[in-house]
Amino acid sequence: MTWNISDKELTGLLTLMSVEEKVAMVSGHGLWRTVANYRLNIPELLMTDGTYGVRYSIDQIDGAHDADNQLASFLSVVNTDLSTGVDSAFGSTRPATCFPNGSSLACSWDLDLAYELGEALAAECQAFGVNILLGPGVNIRRTPLAGRSYEYYAEDPLLTGDIAAAVINGLQHNGVGASLKHFACNNSEVQRTTMSSVVEERALREIYLAGFERR
């Protein structure tokens, strides 16, 4: 779905939205969609993973839209023993290109190539009707033991930020939004939503958050 709207029109819509409508939009409708606003004719937006390829899960996205069922389905994936295989974890997925992961892409130091990756990802998103790609991942690769390190670009915040900005520009210039992830200082997949990362403020500002601020 393509929603053609100017920045001026978008700003005008924001002024017309109530606080409740704004909260509803950012809260989402299930796991993969925003809520549609029928009063102002704002359509829902579809989003999906990922950081180096479009993972369109037919079961999760095109299945029942009940929020509780979608959450249960997602948690079943998170808690799956991946030794049984990715296909068994994510169910049926649409065929899509698997590009080199983040750590491999950053080894090129090639911003033009990163931009082309964003363009290619945008083309596949458009083909699937996806409006927002949940990526790229810009957490700093502090330890190789972190479960998501392969998705991140580097230990260096400048390289990380510049590569990510190029990918995002490639996406956005072709009509697809991007969502930076994951949590800063995310160094473990075990209890990732409850663990505490203790970081001094200077290191946090100069290293871990710098990639999120680059553009």
Image: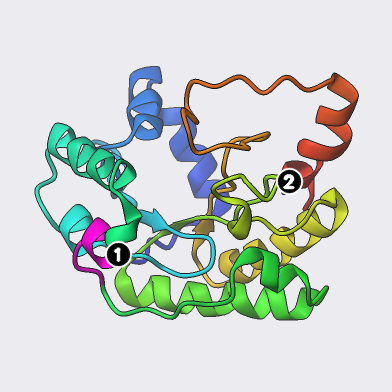
- In what element is the residue under mark 1? loop
Left or right for 37, reference 51 = left
Q: CA distance from mark 1 to mark 2?
A: 27 Å
Residue count near mark 1 (Cα–Cα under 10 Å), binned few <14, some 14–19, many ≥20: few
Within the magenta stretch, is there residue 168? no
Look at the image and name its color scheme: rainbow
- Residue flagged by tag 2: what amino acid is it? Ile
* Residue ID for mark 1: 85
Within the magenta stretch, is there residue 88? yes
Left or right for 76, reference 106 = left
Residue 192 screen position, x and y as percent: 50, 31
- In what element is the residue under mark 2? loop
Q: Nearer the viewer, residue 163 or 191?
A: 191
Nearer to us: label 1 or label 2: 1
Left or right for 64, reference 74 = left
The part of the chain drawn in magenta is 85-93
* Residue ID for mark 2: 140
Identified at 32% across, 36% down, the residue is 28
Task: Give the residue at the far front of this rendering.
Answer: 83
Identified at 16% across, 58% down, the residue is 59
Residue 163 screen position, x and y as percent: 75, 64
Identified at 34% across, 55% down, the residue is 82
- Residue flagged by tag 1: what amino acid is it? Gly
Residue 194 screen position, x and y as percent: 49, 20
Residue count near mark 2 (Cα–Cα under 10 Å), binned few <14, some 14–19, many ≥20: many
Return the mark for residue 120. Answer: none
